[in-house]
Amino acid sequence: MGALKILSEHELKPSIAVVVGTRPGIIKFAPVVYGLQELRVSFFLIHTGQHYSYNMDRQFFEELGLPKPLHRNNRAAQCRYHGEQTAAMIEGVERALLKERPQIVVVGGDANTNLSGALAGRKLGVQVAHMEAGLRSHDWQMPEEHNRVMIDHISDYLFPPTRRAKQNLLHERVRGQIWVTGNTIVDAVRRHAEMGRKRCHAGKHLGFSEGEAYFLLTVHREENVDRKENLSSIVASIGQLARAFQVPLVFPIHPRTRDRLRMFGLTKTLADIEALRVVPAVGYLDFLSLLQQAQLVLTDSGGVQEEACCLKIPCVTLRENTERPETVAVGANIIAGTEPSSVVRAARTILARRRTWRNPFGDGRAGMRIARTLAAKLR
């Protein structure tokens, strides 16, 4: 007999599969999971295995009080290439969906994890929902941009966080139904910010005195860390920032970034920057603590741009574009690229601004809106 390739409607159960696999995805799905739990909707988590170290993954489940994934794919961690990793994750999600047979699979964001979950659901005839739909950087060289567009065009239900994101979907004439929900990052930050503040003084283990100024740095995007010229430019920018502002820079380093620094021979150059404090990747609450007490954050992360905006922390983005233009529009973020003089200039400019911008990402109830909409779609 041939393999089962599609599920019939009568074979599906009134349940929702939530696909996660990365740090940002776990954080952003937490408010949706809380909403599904409150509504007593049947759901389960599938972990694709994209992030697999304790402090990049399991620690987030523990800190956020999330249920353990019912299915976890351990093969994706051994994959080196986009296609290989995506294929392994599709296979893992497909096996889980065939076993559990939910009516809806929901993904959130632009990582390979989300494309894998959406493709697996679409091929099996399971309805696909996309949280954080409609984001666009308009940079077709970014793998994340490919993923966003493809997921949006194969989804039945789309949850853009803002009206601008909805307009992107309407312009592209997507097939699915659309609801503007706000961004669940607001829900997560509001729920956990105080826990982060109470956790500890951010500089306690870094030798800072109470209230001492520092900058926070995160770098992990493929277009930055996989290109020697870009990563070299970022390292040079860090050195110039340290000299120009005479403040420490705290750098929770992503495993991928650490590997590329070593590969490109940049580890010693980075280590020679006296003001730089490189620390291992930290959990969500520790990161919130670091972020809330930072004078400035420099990042290439979309999620950190949003978190900084919500917390009124000035942000400089180390990219040539962003899929979060709302942060720029309200004055919370400056797109600087990676050229050192541009980065230093952007830091000076945004530090001179008053932190009076409005939050463009909603009222902190996006998770429940998404959960209610998904629950209403279960047959």
Image (cartoon, helix red, strand yellow):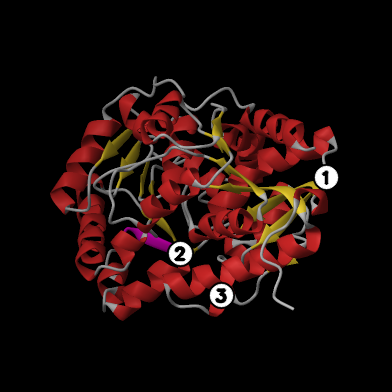
Q: Which residue is mark 3?
A: 77
Work out how far the residue at label 1 is from the one at label 2, CA to CA, in angstroms: 34 Å
Find residue 329 and report its horizontal and vertical position in percent: 32, 26
Residue 250 image offset from top left, x and y in percent? 41, 55
> Which disc is residue 42 wearing?
1
Q: Residue at x 64, y 38 (%)?
A: 192
Quarter of the view holding residue 30? top right
Which amino acid, mark 3? Ala
**Membership of 188 in magenta stretch:** no
What's under tag 1, amino acid-wise? Ser
| Label 3 crowd (10 A; few <14 / some 14-19 / many >=20) | some
Q: Quadrant of the N terminus?
A: bottom right
17 on left or right of 38: left
In the rendering, at what x and y percent does residue 273 appear?
27, 64
Residue placed under numbered mark 2 in the picture: 254
Residue 194 image point, x, y percent: 64, 35
Which badge, 3 or 1, comes first in the chain's sequence? 1
Residue at (60% x, 36% y) in the render = 193
Closer to the N terminus: mark 3 or mark 2?
A: 3
Badge 1 element = loop
Identity of the residue drawn at 64% across and 45% down: 29
- Whether pointer 3 and pointer 2 mark residues with C-beta atoms closer than 8 Å, the reply is no
Magenta-drawn stretch contains 276:
yes
Image position of 273 (left or right of 15) = left
Q: Which residues are magenta?
A: 275-279
Query: Mark 3 falls on what kind of element?
Result: helix
Q: Nearer the viewer, residue 253 or 167?
A: 167
158 shown above or below 358: below
